[in-house]
Image (cartoon, helix red, strand yellow):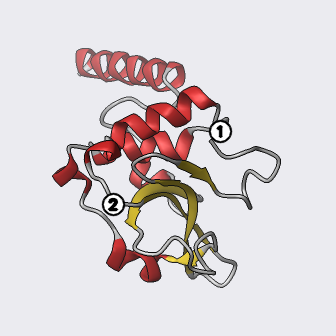
Amino acid sequence: MKKEKKLMLIIFLISSILLATHEGEFWPFSIYPMFSQAGNPWSRGLVEDVQDSSRADLWDTKPLHVVEPRTLALKEYGIHEIDFANYISKTKVWDNTKLNGLRSTFQIDNYPGKMWMATRVVGHLTEQDSVVIEAIPMFLFTSDTTIKNPRLFPEELND
């Protein structure tokens, strides 16, 4: 019986050391992000197919259900959805290099007459335990022009 106790103590010590040095992220004691991040604000991206760029509400933040019918299936255009979502949601400073990188991802020059809106979608939990999801228009791409949302980038000139 003494061997079993010694073995259990060794296993307990090794587990404790691994848990302590890996911030609790050691299998089978891992903290799964889907549960540990619940309730935190989040951000993703989508692309809207814009039919009329003169609409008065073009640059307004809208509920997700309003823009969903206009959402492009990015895969059909050779755009990887997760890469786009990461790019649009994690980029903080939109200099010309980053904006041109996003524009080249769309290859919109190959689709004359199309107008696509790169949109950031943000969600958060309210005090009343309801979820709010909003679509924030960022950039409008046409075959020859990139227009920044004047409400988000008021001090910058559009290219």
Question: What is the crowding at mark 1: few (fewer than 14 residues within 10 Å), some, or many (at least 20)?
Answer: few
| Secondary structure of residue under mark 1 | loop
Q: Is residue 125 left or right of residue 118?
A: right
Amino acid on which the number 2 mark rests in the picture: Gly
Identified at 33% across, 43% down, the residue is 109
| Secondary structure of residue under mark 2 | loop
Identified at 36% across, 15% down, the residue is 10
Q: Position of residue 5 (x, y in %)?
A: 31, 22
Viewer-side residue, 114 vs 137: 114
Q: Position of residue 59 (x, y in %)?
A: 62, 69
Instruction: Say the numbered circle drawn on residue 39.
Output: none
Q: Which quadrant holds residue 78?
A: top left
Q: Position of residue 98 (x, y in %)?
A: 54, 31
**Residue position for label 2:** 113
**Mark 1 or 2: the one toward you:** 2
Amino acid on which the number 1 mark rests in the picture: Lys
**Residue position for label 1:** 92
Could one spot residue 132 in this view of the protein?
Answer: no
Quadrant housing the N terminus: top left
